[in-house]
Image: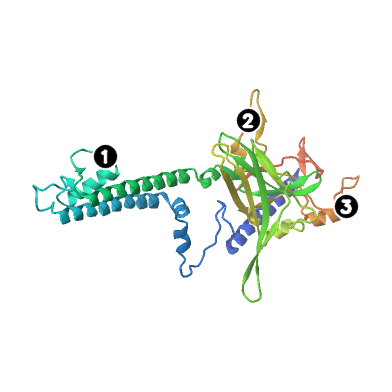
Amino acid sequence: MGTERDEQIVIDTYNTTIHTLGMQNEDKQLRFMQKDGRFLVVFQKAPGHWSPFLVDIFTTLVEIRWRVMFLVFSLSYILSWMFFGLCYWLIAYVHGDTDDVDSAPCVENVRGFTAAFLFSMETQATIGYGFRGMTENCIVAIIVVTVQDVFSCLIDTIVIGIVIAKMASARKRAQTVGFSSCAVVNLRDGVLCLSWRVGDFRGNHILEGVARAMVVRHVKQPAGTVVMSYEELHIQNRDIVLATPTTIIHKLEPGSPLYSLGPDNLLGGDFELVVSFTYTGDSTGMLHQTRTSYTPADIRWGQRFQDMLKLGKRHYKVDYALFNVTTWVPVPLLSAEEFDRRERPTEGGETSGPLIASTMSNGHACNVNPDIIEEVMQQTCL
């Protein structure tokens, strides 16, 4: 009994040390991608850097913040009212309507700039109070009214299109599909595997999607330059039906960039695991992508995700409170490469590499076969 407690204390101390040192290493190492999927990349401005934003003005307006967009649209309406109001006032001034009250005006009841501004706003907003109106005395004023009507339709079309595109932005839908806050390494069918979770937090389900993962490293050249290295990971069952949360699995086998990764390598690992899930929204038919990244500090060795799916009488029940919850499992403290080189457990139950833990059975300590997944303790990913 005391031996079991000692083993458990050693296990807890080991994993706590791994996580603490990993967090310290993460503070020193610059992340390539944040947990919310944003890249920590800043572009230095070059001469004429505003030209791409002005050429693709529609995309620029869709990507800006809501408050900036409302400010731009409000100013576009107010400035257009003022511009056309100034045009009506100049027409009235040249025609003499501002001085001669008895003359036949170009615009009824427009004798000053305030009245011209109000007429411009009423015309463009189609308010139509009936107090001010266009006459047939000035062809120039008729042309200006026609131009303002066409311009008003153009502004309304742009505003409505951008607002709809912004409300249906793929980024908003991507926030309702998430990855687990950590990745885990455990044994599956006698093979070390790296896995993480993805789930849809909305009631409607995504029926088709593709998962991808790559290992990103930055390599410093002797000249002082930095080169980014990208290595694709092979994923089992890349095509996913996300009706329920799914665990994405990558086998640590020959050919994998992480084949030589061991628990000790997590202390000073210089890589970042970038994962993504690309799918089509069932409501809008738009293409969306959710992504995140895991540093070595986010990878938990010797753990697995807690089961979320339960079978009810009439429905399958998913408990999203367990989405980030993991449990300890017996796993060799070896890399997949070393684990494959060593012999498999012998008939006497001896293993070639140390396991994370033994388990308790009826209050007595017993050895554990590494192919058996048995819960030891429970921990929530930080």
In percent of width and height, residue 376 lies at 71, 42
* 1 or 3: tag closer to the N-terminus: 1
Alpha carbon separation for disc pair 3 and 2: 41 Å
Alpha carbon separation for disc pair 1 and 2: 55 Å
Q: Secondary structure at mark 1?
A: loop
In percent of width and height, residue 256 lies at 76, 55
| Residue at 58% across, 43% down | 177
- The numbered mark at residue 127 is 1
Which amino acid type is marked by label 1? Answer: Ile
Residue furthest to the right in view is 347
Q: Residues within 10 Å of mark 1 (few under 14, many from 20)?
A: few
Which amino acid type is marked by label 3? Answer: Glu
Q: Residues within 10 Å of mark 3 (few under 14, many from 20)?
A: few
Find residue 160 and report its image quarter. top left
Residue 80 in view, yes or no? yes
Q: Badge 3 is on which residue?
A: 343
- Would residue 69 appear left or right of 129 to someone viewing this image? right
In percent of width and height, residue 195 lies at 70, 47
| Residue at 12% across, 52% down | 98
Q: Secondary structure at mark 3?
A: loop
Image height of 251 relative to 130, above or below: below
| Residue at 57% across, 34% down | 204
Which amino acid type is marked by label 2? Answer: Lys
Quick one: 185 or 63, which is closer to the camera?
Answer: 63
Q: Nearer the viewer, mark 3 or mark 2?
A: 2
Q: Badge 2 is on which residue?
A: 317
Residue 304 in view, yes or no? no
